[in-house]
C-alpha cells in the first residue's frame, strides 16, 4: 500500500516527547500605569494586570492571550470599580504599587506579588504563577500551618476548609453528599484566609469554568487553578472576617429583600400529584394550625414535564387552585427546569427553534440532552435577548397568581455520561462567544437572573421569590438556594450547618437544606430534630423524594406533629428578628446564619465550631444532631447568654451541658439584646406593618450599650428602595439596681406607624419602682407594669418619638 504523510504522524514517533517544563510568566520586561486605571506588567510570556477596584479590593489578572482583555465576567458588579489614586515606583528588584490602603510589590524576576495592608503588614505572598498543563493556570501562595479557610460556597465537610481540596464545577449529585465529594450544585470560587496572628484576606477567583482549590497538598502553601479561560482574581483586604465578607458581596452584589412569605415555612414533596391533593394539603395545615406560606409543585404539575404548562388531568384548574390557596394566604411555587422538551407542537420549543434561542455547537448543531421530558433543548441564558425571552415566558405563571419559581436541574443536569451539557457548545455570551467548558458554572445563575427579572417585570411592584439549585458567585442577587438532594441522614442534618454557614460567608445569605432530608426515609425523631434546627435557617423548606416515607409535619403522629407545629410557629414568632437580619444581609452582605467565628473571631475555641450557630448576633441555636440524645455541650461565647426555656443566665466563654428532651431545642438569647417577636395566635401570623410586635429583652446583670436593631417595611413591595421603611435602634445598659434603654429611629418613614412600641424585659434582677421616659430631655409618658412572679416588666412607649431614653430603677 502506498505510504502517505500519515506514516510520519508525530503521534507515531517514540522518544521525542519533551516533558513540558513548568510554565511561569517569566521576568517582568515592562511596566506602566494604565489610563483606564490599574497597572500593566509585561513579562517574558504573559501580561499581568494589577487593578485597584476599590481601596481594599485589588484585582490581579494573568493574561496569556495575544489580545489583552480587561473584561470581567457578569458576576462582578461594574459599579464597584472606582478610581483609586496610586503610584508606581520602580526599584532595582521590584515594582511597587502604592495605594491609599495597601501596597503591592511585584518582583521583577518572577512577577510574584506581595501584598501589604494599610499598616504595612505583609498579608499575602506569592510563591508563583504557573501553568500545570496546557491552558491551566494557577497561583500558589504562601500559607501557615495554623491558618483557617472559610467560604468556598456549597461544600461538604466542616466549617474550616484548611486541609481540604475542592473543585468548582456545578454538579447534579444524587450520590450521598459525603466529605470526599468535591463539587456540588453551586460554585463560589471565593475563600477567606484567616489566621489568629495575621490580618485576614479574601480571594475571589472569577472564572466560571472548572477551577480547583488545594489547601491540602502542602503545609507551606496553597494554590488555586483555572482549567480554561484566564486566571483573574481579586484580593480583598480588611481588618475582620466581616469586612472581607461584606466587601466580597459588594463586588458580586447583594440580595434584594425577599417578600415576607418567602421567609415563612415552605412545604414541598416530589411531587404533590394533583390539585386536589394540594388543596387538601393546604387545608390540613390550617386545620392543624401549622403555619405555611408556600407549597411547592414539583415536576408532576406539568404536562409531560413541559415547562410553562399544567397537566390537564392532574391539575385541570390551576387558576382555581391557586386562588383557593391565595385566599388561605398560601403561595404556590412551581418548579421550572431549563430543559425544553423537543416537541414541534410545543410553543416554547417552537419559539426557541424559530428564534435561535437554544444552545448550539459552533458548527450549528443544536445540543440536545435527556432530562425529565426526554430529549430537550436548552436556552442559551448567556445572551441578554434570550434571558429576556425566558423571563417573559413566566407570564404564564404570574397571570395565574404565582409569585415564586423554583429553578432546578440548572447546572445544567443532563442524563448522559458527563452529566451536563457538552463542553464544546458555544455560548453566545452577549457578543463574546465562549465554550460551555468556560462558562459552565454561570449557566444556572443566568437562568435565575432571567427568571427573577421576568417575574419582577410581571408582578407590578410585588417582590418575587426565586429558588435555585445551581449558582455561581453573585447568585444572591437573583435567588435563594437550597442545598440539593441531601438525605434523611443525621449526618446530613449536621452537615447542613457548616454548608449553609459557608454559603453565607460566600455572599449567599438566603439558603437552607431540605428539612427532614430529601432522599432516603426520615424517622420521627429525625424530622422533629431537623425541624427544630431548620426553622432557624434562612431558607426553611421541608422536601422529600418521590418514593420516600412521607414527612409532612404530621406524618409521624401526634407527638412529632406537636413538636413540628410549635417550632414552625416559633419561626413566625422570630420572623421580625429574622427579617431584620435579611435587611442586614441586603445592606451589608453579612450572613443571616452565622458561625460564632464571625462574631467572636478572637476566641480560639470557635474557628471550626459548626454544630451550633448564631442567627444574626442575638440568637444562638445548638441543635441536637444525633438520635436518642437528650443533652449536649453548647459553647457560649463571651458575654451573657440566657437559656430561652429556663431563663437561666450564663456567663459565656465556656461550654455548658444543655438539657434537650425531644421537644426541646437548646436556644440561647444574648442578654441585653432587644429581640422583636411577633405575638399572635393566628394560624399564620402575618409579617407586615400591622403585625403585633413585642420587643423582648432578657436582662443582663451588667454591661452597657448592648446594641440591637429592628427593621420593618411592607414586606412585599419595593417601596423600601425609595426609603419607605422604619429602622429602630436600641441600646441597653444594666447596673445592679437599674437599667436603661435608648431607642432611636434611624428611619421612620412608613406611612402608617404603630401607636406604641411594646418592650418586655424578662428576668429582671431588681424590683422596679420607677420608669422614666425622656424624649430629648423632656419627660414623657410611658405605661408600664411589673409581674413579680415572672420578674418581667412591660413597657408601652407611645410611638411619637424619634429618640427616647427610658430608665428603670
Ligand atoms: C431534583 C431536585 C429535587 C426534585 C427532583 C424532581 O432531584 O434536586 O429537589 O424534587 O429533581 O424535580
Image (cartoon, rainbow, N blue to C red):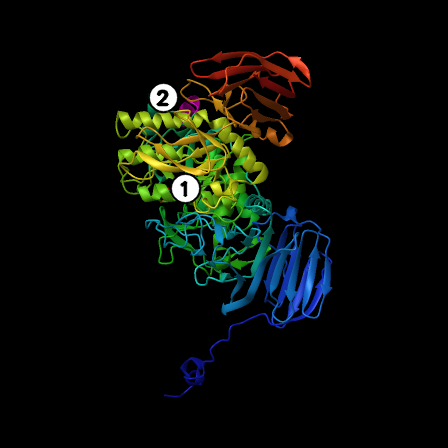
Disc with the residue nearer the chain's start (2 vs 1): 2
Secondary element at image label 1: helix
The label on residue 295 is: none
Q: Which residues are magenta?
A: 322-329
Q: Nearer the viewer, residue 159 or 523?
A: 159
User: Residue 314 lies in what quarter of the image?
Assistant: top left
Above or below for 462 versus 513: above
- Mark nearer the viewer, 2 or 1: 1
Q: Give the distance between the C-alpha atoms of the residues marked 2 and 1, in whole angstroms.
A: 28 Å
Q: Considering the image in quadrants, where does the C terminus appear?
A: top right
Secondary element at image label 2: loop
Q: Nearer the viewer, residue 736 or 326?
A: 736
Above or below for 750 versus 39: above
| Residue bearing the label numbered 1 | 497
Give the prevailing secondary structure in the magenta stretch. helix
| Residue bearing the label numbered 2 | 289
Amino acid at each position: 500500500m502506498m505510504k502517505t504523510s500519515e506514516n510520519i504522524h508525530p503521534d507515531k514517533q517514540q522518544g521525542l516527547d519533551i516533558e513540558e517544563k513548568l510554565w511561569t510568566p517569566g521576568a517582568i520586561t515592562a511596566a506602566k500605569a494604565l489610563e483606564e486605571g490599574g497597572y500593566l506588567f509585561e513579562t517574558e510570556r504573559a501580561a499581568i494586570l494589577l487593578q485597584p477596584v476599590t481601596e481594599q479590593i485589588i484585582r490581579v489578572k494573568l493574561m496569556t492571550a495575544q489580545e489583552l482583555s480587561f473584561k470581567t465576567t457578569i458576576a462582578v458588579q461594574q459599579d464597584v470599580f472606582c478610581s483609586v489614586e496610586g503610584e508606581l515606583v520602580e526599584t532595582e528588584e521590584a515594582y511597587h504599587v502604592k495605594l491609599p490602603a495597601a501596597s503591592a510589590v511585584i518582583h521583577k524576576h518572577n512577577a510574584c506579588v506581595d501584598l501589604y495592608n494599610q499598616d504595612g503588614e505583609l498579608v499575602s505572598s506569592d510563591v508563583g504563577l504557573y501553568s500545570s498543563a496546557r491552558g491551566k493556570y494557577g497561583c500558589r501562595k504562601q500559607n501557615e500551618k495554623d491558618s483557617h479557610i472559610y467560604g468556598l460556597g456549597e461544600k461538604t465537610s466542616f466549617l474550616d476548609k484548611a486541609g481540604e481540596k475542592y473543585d468548582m464545577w456545578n454538579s447534579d449529585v444524587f450520590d450521598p453528599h459525603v466529605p470526599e465529594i468535591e463539587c456540588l450544585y453551586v460554585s463560589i470560587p471565593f475563600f477567606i484566609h484567616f489566621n489568629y496572628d495575621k490580618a485576614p484576606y479574601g480571594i475571589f477567583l472569577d472564572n466560571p469554568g472548572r477551577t480547583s482549590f488545594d489547601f491540602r497538598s502542602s503545609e507551606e502553601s496553597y494554590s488555586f487553578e483555572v482549567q480554561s479561560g484566564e486566571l483573574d482574581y481579586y484580593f480583598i483586604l480588611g481588618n475582620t472576617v466581616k469586612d472581607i465578607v461584606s466587601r466580597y458581596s459588594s463586588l458580586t452584589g447583594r440580595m434584594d429583600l425577599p417578600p415576607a412569605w418567602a421567609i415563612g415555612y415552605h412545604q414541598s414533596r416530589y411531587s404533590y400529584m394533583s390539585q386536589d391533593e394540594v388543596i387538601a394539603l393546604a387545608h390540613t395545615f390550617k386545620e392543624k394550625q401549622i403555619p405555611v406560606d408556600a407549597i411547592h409543585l414539583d415536576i408532576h404539575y406539568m404536562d409531560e414535564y413541559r415547562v410553562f404548562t399544567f397537566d390537564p388531568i392532574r391539575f385541570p384548574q390551576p387558576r382555581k387552585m391557586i386562588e383557593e390557596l391565595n385566599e388561605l394566604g398560601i403561595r404556590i411555587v412551581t418548579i421550572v427546569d431549563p430543559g425544553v422538551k423537543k416537541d414541534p407542537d410545543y410553543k416554547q420549543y417552537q419559539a426557541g427553534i424559530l428564534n435561535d434561542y437554544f444552545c448550539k455547537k459552533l458548527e450549528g448543531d443544536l445540543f440536545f440532552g435527556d432530562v425529565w421530558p426526554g430529549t430537550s433543548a436548552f436556552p442559551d441564558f448567556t445572551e441578554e435577548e434570550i434571558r429576556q425571552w425566558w423571563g417573559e415566558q413566566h407570564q404564564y405563571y404570574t397571570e395565574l397568581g404565582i409569585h415564586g419559581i423554583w429553578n432546578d436541574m440548572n447546572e445544567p443536569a443532563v442524563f448522559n455520561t458527563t452529566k451536563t451539557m457538552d463542553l464544546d457548545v458555544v455560548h453566545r455570551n452577549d457578543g463574546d462567544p465562549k465554550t460551555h467548558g468556560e462558562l459552565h458554572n454561570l449557566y444556572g445563575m443566568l437562568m435565575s437572573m432571567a427568571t427573577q427579572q421576568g417575574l419582577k417585570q410581571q408582578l407590578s411592584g410585588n417582590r418575587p421569590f426565586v429558588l435555585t439549585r445551581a449558582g455561581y458567585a453573585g447568585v444572591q442577587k437573583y435567588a435563594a438556594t437550597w442545598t440539593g438532594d441531601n438525605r434523611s441522614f443525621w449526618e446530613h442534618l449536621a452537615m447542613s450547618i457548616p454548608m449553609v454557614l459557608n454559603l453565607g460567608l460566600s455572599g449567599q445569605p438566603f439558603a437552607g437544606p431540605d428539612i427532614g432530608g430529601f432522599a432516603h426515609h426520615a424517622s420521627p425523631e429525625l424530622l422533629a430534630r431537623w425541624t427544630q434546627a431548620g426553622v432557624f435557617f434562612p431558607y426553611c423548606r421541608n422536601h422529600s423524594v418521590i418514593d420516600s416515607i412521607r414527612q409532612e409535619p404530621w406524618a409521624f403522629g401526634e407527638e412529632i406533629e406537636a413538636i413540628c407545629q410549635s417550632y414552625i410557629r416559633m419561626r413566625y414568632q422570630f420572623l421580625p428578628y429574622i427579617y431584620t437580619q435579611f435587611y442586614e444581609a441586603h445592606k451589608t452582605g453579612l450572613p443571616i446564619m452565622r458561625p460564632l467565628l464571625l462574631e467572636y473571631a478572637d476566641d480560639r475555641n470557635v474557628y471550626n465550631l459548626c454544630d451550633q450557630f448564631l442567627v444574626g448576633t442575638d440568637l444562638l441555636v445548638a441543635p441536637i444532631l444525633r438520635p436518642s440524645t437528650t443533652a449536649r455541650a453548647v459553647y457560649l461565647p463571651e458575654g451573657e447568654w440566657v437559656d430561652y426555656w429556663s431563663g437561666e443566665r450564663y456567663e459565656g466563654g465556656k461550654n455548658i451541658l444543655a438539657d434537650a428532651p425531644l421537644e426541646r431545642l437548646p436556644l440561647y438569647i444574648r442578654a441585653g439584646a432587644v429581640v422583636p417577636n411577633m405575638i399572635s395566635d393566628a394560624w399564620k401570623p402575618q409579617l407586615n406593618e400591622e403585625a403585633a410586635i413585642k420587643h423582648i429583652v432578657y436582662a443582663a446583670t451588667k454591661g452597657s450599650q448592648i446594641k440591637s436593631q429592628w427593621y420593618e417595611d411592607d414586606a412585599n413591595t419595593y417601596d423600601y428602595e425609595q426609603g419607605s421603611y422604619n429602622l429602630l435602634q436600641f441600646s441597653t445598659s444594666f447596673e445592679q439596681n437599674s437599667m436603661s434603654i435608648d431607642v432611636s429611629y434611624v428611619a421612620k418613614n412608613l406611612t402608617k406607624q404603630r401607636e406604641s412600641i411594646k418592650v418586655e424585659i424578662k428576668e429582671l434582677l431588681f424590683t422596679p419602682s420607677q420608669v422614666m421616659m425622656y424624649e430629648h430631655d423632656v419627660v414623657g409618658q410611658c405605661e408600664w407594669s411589673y409581674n413579680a412572679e415572672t420578674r418581667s416588666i412591660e413597657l408601652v412607649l407611645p410611638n411619637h418619638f424619634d429618640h427616647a431614653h427610658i430608665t428603670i430603677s
